[in-house]
Amino acid sequence: MILVFALAACSSKDTSGSGEKSKGKKDKVEIFSWWTGAGEEDGLKALLALFKEKHPDVAVENAAVAGGAGTNAKAVLASRMQGNDPPSTFQVHGGAELNEGWVAAGKMEPINDLYDKEGWNDKFPKSLIDMVSKDGNIYSVPVNIHRGNVLWFNKKVFDDNGLQVPKTFDEFFQVADKLQAKGITPLALGDKEPWTATQVFETILVAKLGVDGYNKLWTGELPFDDAKVKESAETFKKMLGYINKDHSSRNWQDASQLVADGKAAMNIMGDWAKGYFVNDLKLKLNEDFGFTTTPDSAGIFTVITDTFGLPKGVKNVDDVKTFLAVLGSVEGQDAFNPLKGSIPARVDADTSKYDDYGKATIEDFKTAQLAPSLAHGSAAAEGFVTKANQAVNIFVTQLDVDGLINSLKSAQAELKK
Ligand code: GAL
């Protein structure tokens, strides 16, 4: 009950819309996402402003539901889709979340025609188009590419203590011991929303298993009781020995804040954290904070792509496509991504618009081995992600390696449904 009220309160959906429609006014393009509040909404607002400038005749409604990684939005979306009341377009991760979720359920329209019309087929990397395609049809437009395996650090803390930023797990634990001895929390975690801990775990899995092994987990070719998965869980357990005590009452922004304040030295988070550091906390990249890949994951790129498609049953199809055309344009991507912290999904974006992190990440993406994120729904279907989040959430307090492995094993039935 409380959850229902909370979700209703979070949603900014304007319920007066139906009255307007009956007077014969044009339907608004309702854009559904979880980008609201600090570190989340700046990019979307810039994109909406650009759209308004280009298409003042098309009304847009920002229907964002707060909660990192779609913690609340996904539940609201599911009930609306089930009730045949889809938003005009909604945020969905490329990969399993889109293809095994909404496309497999028959809820999305193919948009190959839009790709043809806009000449997009060679403007997005093939790897990304594959993530938004099923059985030869394309179902959404990527607005960005976020990197998940990033370790952020407070530069002053490292400099003042004469420490080198860790590149490997061995180095991480050496540095963590030194920081702990000085009374500084080595690793900030905010797992009030459990996905943040799952994201840390996935960076360990991909580092220990390699991209091929990691991918085999999601196809069932590699069992969750594989020795490397156990080793990953052991490493995860060891890392959790270095986190802030109040982790379960913090969200991702609150954990980033600990690093910003120098109360913690490091944080593992997707590069939306950079948007938060720079735009909200006004920190300077490479002066106040720095970045590197998570331990032993150089050359690997955990991909999180936010995309928008066309749900079946939407009436104002042309207006929605007009919005998607702006979202997929160079201009749209370059308005959105420098603020969001992500890199553009398009290969022909204007790299001069991006900071040193963005420029380096654009280059890395071209050569890195790509791994879909589990925590953000690209690697596995929603049913599995939910169970994995629950298992990881229990693990963070109980630290029971066998318990985690067993839970993941029994969740395996949820894969490829
Ligand atoms: C991800 C999403 C990002 C960012 C993050 C934190 O799932 O792809 O764009 O919003 O959650 O909420």
Image (cartoon, rainbow, N blue to C red):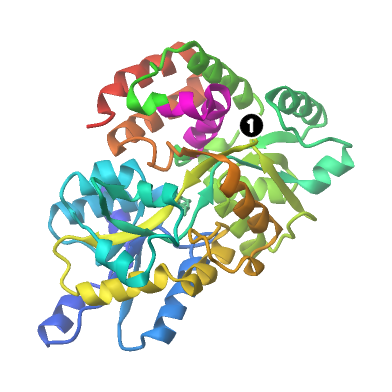
Q: Nearer the viewer, residue 261 or 316?
A: 316
Picture residue at 81% right of the left edge, 43% below the top: 157
Identify the image quadrant of residue 153: top right
Quarter of the figure with the C terminus: top left
Answer left or right for 406 relative to 285: left
- Of residue 203 and residue 111, the one placed in the foreground of this image is 111
| Image spot of residue 57 (x, y percent) | 31, 88
The vertical placement of 320 against 209, above or below, is below
Magenta part, dominant SS: helix
The answer to whether the beta carbon of the residue marked 1 is less than 8 Å from any atom of ligand 1 is no
State yes or no: residue 321 in magenta: no
Residue type indicated by callout 1: Ile
> Which image quadrant is residue 235 in?
top right
Q: Determine the residue positioned at 75% across, 46% down.
A: 154
**Taking 249 as reference, is 75 left or right?**
left
Tag count in the figure?
1
Decide: few, some or many residues near mark 1? Use Cα within 10 Å; few <14, some 14-19, many ≥20: many
SS state under label 1: loop
Specify start and end residues of the magenta stretch as a single range: 196-215
Percent position of residue 51, x then y: 41, 79
Question: Picture quarter containing residue 190?
Answer: top right
Res. 29 visible in picture: no
On screen, residue 212 above or below 73: above
In the displayed structure image, the side of residue 103 where residue 52 appears, left or right: right
Q: In front: 139, or 122? A: 122
In the image, what residue occupies the spot 73% across and 49% down? 290
State the residue position of label 1: 243
Query: Can see residue 317?
Result: yes
Question: Residue 34, position in %: x, y?
Answer: 40, 57
Q: Which residue is drawn at the image coordinates 59% and 69% (left, top)?
A: 350
Q: Is residue 416 found left or right of 127 in the rendered image? A: left
